[in-house]
Image (cartoon, rainbow, N blue to C red):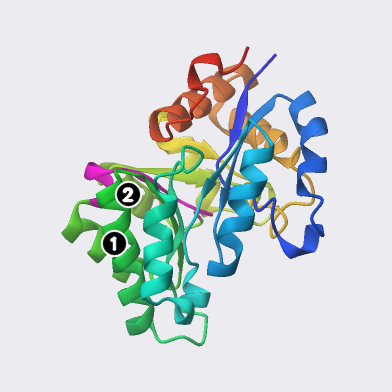
Amino acid sequence: MISLIDTHIHLDAPELSGQGLDLLPEAQQCGINRFVVPGVRVSGWLGMLALAEKTENVYLAPGLHPAYADQWNDAAASQLRELTQQSKVVAIGEIGLDGTVAIPLSQQEIVFRAQLDIALDARLPVLLHVREATGAVLTILRALGIGQRIGGIWHGFSARLPVAEELVELGFKIGVGPILLRSNARKLPNAVKMLPVSALVLETDLPDMADAPETLLQVAEKVALLREESLAEVAEFTTRNALQLFHFQDESSYGE
């Protein structure tokens, strides 16, 4: 039986009406054995924690999505710092810059940098959300040495191969998700074919980009096809990469 890890799945999304955990048994039958739930709004952090505490194989990455950067204040910063002490917290996310939302990039950057500081202090990797702000984010990552110091994942990657190669050099993993399954996808498939196996992790970004957690298996199968490798090989190296990045509290029993 293969073992896969979904590094980005919103099991607490409002669209799931509180039923996110009900999706997991079928996913586990497909070999998907760990799920990392990223944060979006401050108001969702404690609910994420409660969700993770209900289920052994669900972990969280609390953080403030750039679309909601206006929610950031001293109380939010304090709460996020406290959450980093929870054993179920394995990363800070999803954080970054988004050039398509109404909040000015200058304001988003203040919040992004503040959350990077918290991640650095807690020695936790980061899950990055980047849209129409690649250059600005790369500049920050280079200057602070985030990848080399704590590592992280560029979530929902869809840029050109040179960007992916620089991210890998900077110490980041590439989040490969359902974009890979689109018939018109060109840049991500090329990156998947050309990058070293140590660079790739899998995600669904459910419910935004997938209807069911089992979509992760389809993504893994497409990676295998593009790289001319077996599904078992893809499962092995993407799982290994995720385990190197996240410190799951039950890691020693993974896959049993």
In the rendered structure, are the residues bearing label 2 and label 1 in contact, judged by CB atoms less than 8 Å apart?
A: yes
Judging depth in this view, the residue of 110 and 166 nearest the camera is 110
Q: Residue at x 34, y 62 (%)?
A: 115
Q: Judge from the rendering whether residue 61 lies leftward or rightward of residue 26; answer left or right.
A: left
**Which amino acid lies under the numbered mark 2 shown in the image of this protein?**
Leu
Image location (x, y in percent) of residue 206: 69, 52
**Mark 2 = which residue?**
167
Quadrant assignment for the N terminus: top right
Name the image quarter holding residue 2.
Answer: top right
| Mark-to-mark CA distance, 2 and 1 | 8 Å
45 lies left or right of 107: right
Residue 127, placed above or below residue 36: below
Q: Secondary structure at mark 2?
A: helix
From the top left corner, tell me how far across and down residue 223 is, in percent: 59, 34
Instruction: Locate residue 244, reporting x and y percent.
Output: 39, 28
State the image quarter where residue 30 is shown: top right
- Residue 73, above or below 120: below
| Amino acid, disc 1 | Leu
**18 in relation to 191, above or below:** below
Would you say residue 59 is visible in this rendering?
yes
Q: What stretch of residues is rendered in magenta?
A: 146-157
Q: Is residue 152 magenta?
A: yes
Q: Which mark is residue 138?
A: 1
- 111 sits to left or right of 35: left
Pick whichever, 67 or 98, lies toward us.
Answer: 67
The image position of residue 8, as x and y in percent, is 58, 47
Residue at horizontal 53 percent and vertical 20 percent from the top = 236
Query: Across the whole image, how many numbered discs are drawn on residues?
Result: 2
